[in-house]
Amino acid sequence: MATIKEWVSGARLRTLPAAIAPVIVGTSLAAPYPIWSNALLALLVALSLQIGVNFSNDYSDGIRGTDTDRVGPMRLVGSGAAKPQHVLTAALLFFALAGIFGLLLALRSSLWLILVGLLSILAAWGYTGGKRPYGYRALGEISVFIFFGLVAVLGTYFVQSETITTLAIVAAIPVGAQACAILVLNNLRDRNKDAESGKRTLAVLMGEKVTRILFALLILGSNVLGIATSIDRAWCALTALLLPVALYLAATVVKGAGGRDLIALLQRTALFQLLFALMYAAGFALSA
């Protein structure tokens, strides 16, 4: 039976910046009059979905045998630390929590959000779950961009403003790109094992060199777009302070960092995303 420490490790809490960042940015877009109760509910939905998808991936990859002898965070099923059914139950529990928080949010704003929430949960499960998981067909990055970028930022903004603006769409793009970058780096780390087990991620299809270049383009492009937003919101120029960090991450990956070095780079990329979201949000709030 898995210990509490192993369950916490299996939840992959270091991935949570991908859930927190879009809520921070979406809320800042509603400045100077954000609705903090709705922002909190949006955050709870995002966190529940992220943890739910982490457990779901652990379960689905584990029962397929694609999580054996991997480098990286604890795999509950793949390592044999927990029974598959228990990990599945944990995933469904967090999906249910996301549904409950999402329903409360929909009742406070728009019932259309129930459909958005349902699609989000189905996308989270379908990444590695079901008979034809799209994560095994090089579609993971597209889904992450849509749901952890566009949907998360625009949804958070909508429940506080009841509108969608061009600026909000633009602001969602770098957030989604950075979430994609994290997944690209994760799949780069697992590329060889995925290829052996038949998991056709984008990294497997494109090859190592192109995958490294894609990561660099996502990280640098997102930072540049954040800086460019200062044309309309002057204080968003604050994101220029992170350009040296983006250059460091991009250069380190392109130059060939591999193995366990990629684990540290994943953590730094997640931290970069969180710092970017905070600076981007400060830019929107100060420019409001």
Image (cartoon, helix red, strand yellow):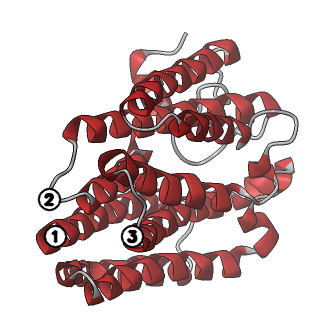
Compared to 266, does 74 lie above or below? above
C-alpha separation, residue under disc 3 versus residue under disc 2 = 17 Å
Identify the amino acid type marked 1. Answer: Ala
Identify the mark at residue 180; answer none if there is no mark: none
Q: Are marks 2 and 1 in contact (CB under 8 Å)?
A: yes
Identify the mark at residue 288; answer none if there is no mark: 1
In the structure shown, which secondary structural element does the residue marked by tag 2 occupy?
loop
Q: Earlier in the sequence, mark 1 or mark 3?
A: 3
Q: Which residue is mark 2?
A: 32
* Left or right of 262 on screen, residue 85: right
Where the C terminus falls, by quadrant? bottom left
Residue depicted at x 53% and y 20%: 96
Q: Which residue is mark 3?
A: 171
Q: Earlier in the sequence, mark 3 or mark 2?
A: 2
Q: Earlier in the sequence, mark 2 or mark 1?
A: 2
Check disc 3: other Cα within 10 Å, few if <14, some if 14-19, many if 20+.
Answer: many
Residue depicted at x 77% and y 27%: 63
The percent position of residue 88, horizontal first and vertical second, equals: 65, 20
C-alpha separation, residue under disc 1 versus residue under disc 3 = 14 Å
Between residues 145 and 263, which one lies in front from this camera angle? Answer: 145
In the structure shown, which secondary structural element does the residue marked by tag 3 occupy?
helix
C-alpha separation, residue under disc 2 versus residue under disc 1 = 6 Å
The percent position of residue 159, horizontal first and vertical second, equals: 36, 45
In the displayed orientation, state which residue is furthest to the top.
1
Identify the amino acid type marked 2. Answer: Pro
